Amino acid sequence: MTERDVLLKIVARDVDYKEPVDNFMTKDPATLPKRATLGEAVRLMNDRDFRHIPIVDESTGEAVAIFSIRYVIDYLAESFPEQVLNLPPRPHQKMITPEGG
């Protein structure tokens, strides 16, 4: 069950909190196998506007981890602090959505 599931299907709705989680969770979510590359994960996240992806064991289909875009951001910030943290402002840059939107 994702944050998006909660926001779209539960918040501000008349929901019986005794209902099972599977009534609200994403059915058949996109997943990646453990052998997937970082590039594949980032591409899927970018293409489908995901922030988290379940990682599954191919032999059992069982979820074994959650890959988060936060891991990528933390890695880049820690590995390249001068380049990431000291970027100059870009006045010409146009954002697709308003900040926080």
Image (tube, rainbow, N blue to C red):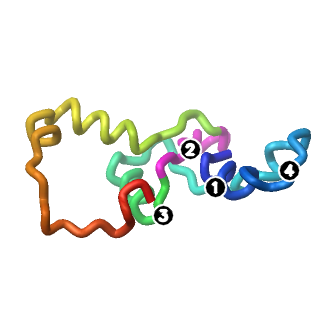
Residue 48: numbered disc = 3
Instruction: Give coordinates of residue 90: x percent, y percent.
Output: 13, 59
Give how far across and how far down residue 61 sits, in percent.
66, 44
What segment carries the magenta color? 51-62
The front one of 72 and 16 is 16
Q: Amino acid at mark 1?
A: Pro
The CA span between labels 4 and 3 is: 27 Å
Count of numbered tags: 4
**Badge nearest the viewer, 3 or 1:** 3
Quarter of the picture holding the N terminus: top right
Q: Is residue 33 left or right of residue 62?
A: left
What's under tag 2, amino acid-wise?
Answer: Pro
Q: Does residue 15 belong to the magenta stretch? A: no
* Real-space Cα separation, disc 3 to disc 1, in angstroms: 11 Å
Q: Earlier in the sequence, mark 2 or mark 4?
A: 4
Q: Which mark is residue 15?
A: 4
**Residue 54 on the magenta span:** yes
Identity, as a three-letter code, of the amino acid under mark 4: Val
Read off the residue under disc 1. 29
Quarter of the image with the C terminus in it: bottom left
Q: Which residue in the protein does label 2 denote?
A: 54
Spatial CA distance of label 4 from label 1 is 22 Å
Instruction: Evaluate if marks 3 and 2 touch, with contact meaning CB atoms under 8 Å apart.
Output: no
